[in-house]
């Protein structure tokens, strides 16, 4: 299976960025504790994370509008690259939270997705 040669490298770097940023927001016991706070208001954690994705997407749109006008895309102190990485990280976190909430487990959810694509995950 081919993919872009830099894709896995970006995923590895994204994981490191996530770990470094996460220490500012969460606890070692629960790395998603800050994102689980929506549960205190009766909102499932994965939906709370999707709301944060919306915030990041708004930042991306703002950056794109600035870019199209020939302006610097930095929003406050966050560059567009940082926002794009955050968006990807929040997507993965929401995926994990959704799988846990549904009692499926991440592996099983991935297995189901691959199976629907006609791929036997055991052959990988």
Image (cartoon, rainbow, N blue to C red):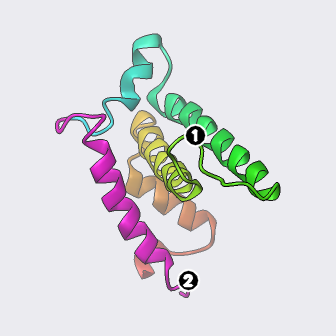
> Which disc, if any, is residue 77?
none
Q: Distance between the residues labelled 2 and 1?
A: 25 Å
* Residue located farthest toward the left when viewing the structure as drawn: 29
Does residue 83 lie above or below 43 as drawn? Answer: below
Q: Which x, y percent locates residue 14?
A: 40, 61
- Check the picture and name the quadrant holding the C terminus: bottom left
Give the magenta range. 1-29
Tell me, yes or no, whether the highlighted magenta stretch contains residue 2.
yes
Q: What element carries label 2?
A: loop
Q: Mark 2 points at which residue?
A: 3
Residue shown at the point (47%, 62%) measured from the top left:
111
Graded by Cα atoms within 10 Å as few (under 14), some (14 to 19) or many (20 or more), the crowding at tag 2 reads few
**Mark 2, mark 1: which one is toward the viewer?**
1
Q: Which residue is drawn at 64% across and 42% down?
A: 59
Badge 1 crowding class, 10 Å Cα cut-off, few under 14, some 14 to 19, many 20 or more, is: many
Q: Is residue 19 magenta?
A: yes
Residue 82, position as x, y percentages in the image? 50, 54
Q: What label does residue 53 carry, if any?
A: 1
Tell me the SS state at disc 1: helix
Relative to 26, 14 lies left or right: right
Q: Nearer the viewer, residue 69 or 87?
A: 69
Q: Which of marks 2 and 1 is nearer the N terminus?
A: 2
Instruction: Examine the image and state in which quarter residue 34 appears.
Output: top left
- Furthest-top residue in this view: 41
Q: Quadrant of residue 25?
A: top left
**Is residue 59 shown above or below 10?**
above
Front-lying residue, 8 or 56: 56
């Amino acid at each position: 299976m081919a993919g872009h040669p830099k894709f896995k490298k970006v995923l590895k770097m994204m994981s490191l960025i996530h770990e470094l940023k996460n220490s500012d927001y969460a606890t070692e016991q629960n790395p998603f504790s800050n994102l689980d706070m929506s549960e205190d208001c009766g909102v499932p954690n994965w939906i709370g994370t999707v709301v944060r994705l919306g915030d990041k997407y708004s930042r991306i749109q703002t950056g794109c509008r600035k870019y199209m006008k020939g302006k610097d895309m930095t929003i406050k102190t966050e560059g567009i690259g940082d926002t794009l990485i955050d968006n990807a990280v929040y997507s993965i976190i929401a995926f994990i939270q959704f799988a846990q909430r549904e009692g499926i487990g991440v592996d099983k959810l991935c297995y189901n997705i691959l199976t629907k694509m006609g791929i036997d995950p055991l052959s990988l």
